[in-house]
Structures are given as C-alpha cells and as structure tokens.
Amino acid sequence: MRAAALYGTLGPLSLSLAMSALLATPATGRPLAASTARAATTATTTPSATAPAGAAGAPLTSPASPATRSVSAVPVAPAAPAWSSWSGSPASAATAATPPGDAASARGVTLAARRAAERGIAFRRCPRAEALAAPITCGKVSVPLDYARPRGKHISLTVSRVRATGPKARRQGALVYNPGGPGASGMAFPEYAAEEAFRRVAAAYDFVGYAPRGVGRSAPLSCQRPSAYAKAPTSSPPHPTAAFKRRLVARARAYVRGCVRRAGPALAHYTTLNNARDLEVLRAALGQRRLTFVGASYGTYYGAVYATLFPERVRRMVFDSVVNPAPWRIWYRDNLDQSVAFERRWRDWRRWVARHHAVYHLGTTDARVLASYEKARRRLGHKPAGGVVGTAQLQSAFLRTGYNDAYWDPAAQALAAYLHGDPEPLIALAAPDPAQAADDENGNAVYTAVECNDAPWPRTWATWNRDNTALARRAPFETWDNVAMNLPCAFWPLKPGRPLDVGHLEAVGPRTGRVALPPVLLLSAERDAATPYAGAKELWHRLPGSSLVTERKAGTHGVWGGPNDCVNRHVDTYLLTGRTPGRSASCAPRPEPAPLPAPAPLPESGKQPAAIPGTP
C-alpha cells in the first residue's frame, strides 16, 4: 500500500517513499525518515507503504484543549469491500522467501540473538551521513542475511540512540521505534526526545531508532538509478487508456528486472518475517530482556508479527495507525481497501476547501473544488509547471492531504495560486527534490521487495485490470497510482511467502508451556486513509488483551505526538506504567486546520507513507 512518511506506509500500505516525508513524525512535523516534504513521482504506494511512511506532522493550528474520553465500546467499522477472487500459480524461482514456522530460521534467530547479546552495540559519534548530532550516538548490529543459515553472510543494521534524561532509578530501558514503509528509516527518532510532546517518555526511556535491512545505510537495496526513479514530469491519469496500461506493465517488468539484477540472491531475504527477526536480534544487542516498541503504519504489522513469533519477549508495544493483518488481505486486498479510503479523505479535503471558499476561491461545494483540481490537472497535462510538475507530481503532492491535515492549507493555497497564474507555490509543493532521489528510490525498492516477497499477488494482468478498472469508477483519485506502485509484484520472480496468522501463537509451532502476550496499545484515527480503521479493529480482535484508542472523526495518519492530548496521555500512561484504558477508549478529534493569512512553511512531514510519532 502506499504510505507516507513518519509513518512510512504501505505505500499506501506502503507509502511510496516518495512520500517518505509524510512518513514522519511525532508532533514536530520533522520527518523521521530524513526526507523533505516534497513528493517524488507517483509511481509509488501500504498498509504501509513508507510513505513511508505515516506521520503526525506539525499541525498548522494551535493545539486543541484536552480531548474528552469515553469508554463506550468502539463502533464496528463498515464491512470492507469484497474483491474478486484471483488465482494463478506464482512464477517458479530458485529461491523463495522463508516460510513461517521454519525450524532452521527459528534456530538461526536464537543463535544470532545470543551472539548479539554477547557483543552488544558499540555506540559512538554518528557518521556525518546520518546528520545526527550529540548527544545522539550511533552503532551497528550484525544480522544474518538468511536466518536459516546464521553462520553465512551477515549484514549490518545502523542503530541510533539517545539516553533517557531522568534519574537512573526511574529509567525503564530502551524504547525502539519504527516509522513504517516498508522502506522507512527510524534513525532520526532519538531527536524527538528533546520535543515537549515526548518529554515524559524520554525521561524514562532511551530513544532507539534504526534503519531496517535494505534501508539507508543498512545494506541498502536498489532497483534502478535514482535519476530514473525521480524522472519528472510524468503522467497519472485517473482512468488510463489501454496504451497507458501497456506502458505501466512494461515499466513494472523492467523494474523487476532491475531489482533482480542489482540485488541478486539477496532479494529473497527482504521480508516482514526477517524484519521481525532482526528486531529480536536488536533487542538482544541492546541488552533488553524484553522489548518495548512503538511501530507506526507498516511498523504495526511487523511489530504484530514479532509479537506472534516472540510473545515471551514482549514488554510493551504501541501500534499507531494499524495495518490490517488478516493473512488474506496481505497485501493485494489491503491496497485495494486503501484506495477506497483515500477517496473518502480526498472528499474530506475538498469539503473543507469549499467551506473556506472566501479564502481560496476554489468552489463552494466539494464538486466545484474537484472541478478546480481537474482544471489544474488538464493544464499540467498540456504544459507541466516549471517543466517538472506534471499530473503525476500533482496527484502525489495532493495525496498528502489524505495523510495529514497539516497539508490542507498549503495544498489549497498552491492550487489557488496556480489557477490564478502563479505556479511557484505548486512547484514548491510538488516538484521532486533531486537531493532526495537516492533515498526515495531506496525506500521504494525495499517497499517493493518486502511486499512482493511477503504474500501471493495476482499473476495475471487481467485480474489487476478488472479489479482496478471497477474500483476506479468510484475511487479514481488513488486507484491507478496504487496499481503503478504495486504492479511489479505481478511479475515478481521469487516464490512468495505465506503471511503469518497474526495473534495465533501456535501458528509458528508448538510452545512449551503457556505463553501469554502482555497487553498492547493500539491507536487509530477513524478516517485514516493509509491504514483504514477496519485494520485496527481486526488486530484488536486478534490480540484479546489489547486496548484500542480511537481518534474520532479524524484522519491524520499517525496520532501519537500530535495535537491530541487525549491520545498522548493514553500513550504516556501505558509506556510509563503499563496500564491501558481498558478494552477501548475514544478521544475527540483534533481541531480542523484553519486557513492561514499568508503561506506558511511546508511541514516536513505529512504516512508511508510512512505519522509518530507519526505519515501500507
């Protein structure tokens, strides 16, 4: 799925890492994925995809007064659409992603964790490339490329840490964070320890971030030249012609060939299962008997996989903006659901703009605002703005309005200015940043490899075309861009894995003695598009001791660290004491943004993709 950045997202389950700026942050709006707020080309989209990444992003309005909480039962989410069944045996491959419950891999994790515990992590001044200043320090942890062969090739994961600020007697160990993706980096997470929203938690915990396998400087994966990935302008028709679809297929096939050529045999080992195994090795290397973890967007999925594989190692877990973990939804159906949810959020933005017609002059109804957007899209199709903003860049930039309310005003101002003859605000909002091309391409490569390896996808173009042509009739905004991001999985040459039955502890093999998973905390915004609310309900039911905190009538992807004091209090209480608010709790929505009298600086994050600290 395409996801944005603090949260990386499935772009949307995966956020396109082009959206990795969205994947980002806790309350500050600065990205955890170290990328700018500009979007790359639209050929990207997770739950979780990263981009990445999702993000709570810095609000452009003043913080709300503390929201009220009700302990009434969480309402049942609308039933998800039923997509057509698909079949087709996957292409044969010499190597396959490791299946769940593999005994050799289980032994490999045990061996790798024991060695990591013995070696620890040598934290030192961070390399300049990480752009992290003291008191943050950096180190590396070695993990097997293939856990079934733990004495074979190893790769190094980069890790960052800042020590807890409180008295030693009150410290509770390490808090590990992942912003989602797949493909987003959490290396910048320790920077948030200095923010007011995280002050209480940072007093008790070391803030630990890391770059998962393939991401950043953790044995980076690449599938094409960054300049080719960031090529602009490009096109993004909501109802593509047959000729355009043929080009989509050709590009997807070429992209897969690039992944195979550049990664070689290692390509099979970028999976959610291995991400969860790496997390177990990281826990051991940090010297933690049990893991305290916050995952956003896609990070909720592999955190839930970790909890299923290693329940005895879980101390506390927060899952923010929850991917639907049902095995039959990973990942094809999750992406279809995401396109439906983005259509609803796209309408939310248009209605907000219509209510402020006196400011933006884009229309007094959501239909008229849509007509204004379509007028801009047609113009850009004929003449790209600044020579670099075409219809694909326009769609990718405005997709951010679905990830984070902080983009509502900047997007409306840019559209209004463009239609009135000033293209510069739109260029600033939508033009890809060449300096980010390498990071964006890397994130997209990891997203693709993980999602394609994780689960079966339809192998015939006819199935993709049928499902998405029908879907685009009622959800045109994101449908075909989501297809463009995920279509390489139709032609993936490796045998896909079988998604783990999350929450079913016996799914990974017989247990010795009774193992109970400690209570975990789930956070979800009711109108989240990158990770629709039904996913939170699904995981809530799968983890009987879990507690679901819902931000009502809100849709920003990634809610921890944002302006909702009610949500933040629940997270603080849980991380500091282990107490949950019962089976469920509700928080009133954050206030809608207000139009600003003058253009404000763009937030650095919108998730992704991809929120924290919150942008598939």
Image: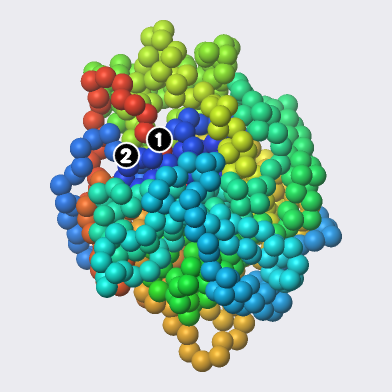
In the rendered structure, the answer to whether residue 521 lies left or right of residue 89 reads left
Front-lying residue, 232 or 178: 178
The image position of residue 590, as x and y in percent, is: 24, 45
Q: Which residue is mark 2?
A: 58
One can see residue 275 in this view: yes
Residue extending furthest toward the top = 421
* Residue ID at (71%, 71%): 150
Estimate the spatial distance between the alpha carbons at disc 2 and disc 1, rounded to whole Å.
Answer: 8 Å
One can see residue 532 in this view: no
Question: Which label sits on residue 604?
Answer: 1
Front-lying residue, 191 or 399: 191
Within 10 Å of the Cα at label 1, are there few (<14), some (14-19), or many (20+) other Cα atoms? many
The image position of residue 43, as x and y in percent, is: 61, 35
Front-lying residue, 206 or 309: 206
Question: Which label sits on residue 163?
Answer: none
Q: Amino acid at mark 1?
A: Glu
Picture quadrant of residue 555: top left
Q: Helix or strand or loop: what does disc 1 sit on?
A: loop
Within 10 Å of the Cα at label 2, are there few (<14), some (14-19), or many (20+) other Cα atoms? many
Q: Amino acid at mark 2?
A: Ala
Taking 355 as reference, is 479 above or below it? below
Q: Helix or strand or loop: what does disc 2 sit on?
A: loop
Residues at badges 2 and 1 in contact (C-beta under 8 Å)? Answer: yes
* Residue ID at (66%, 33%): 226
* Residue ID at (68%, 65%): 144
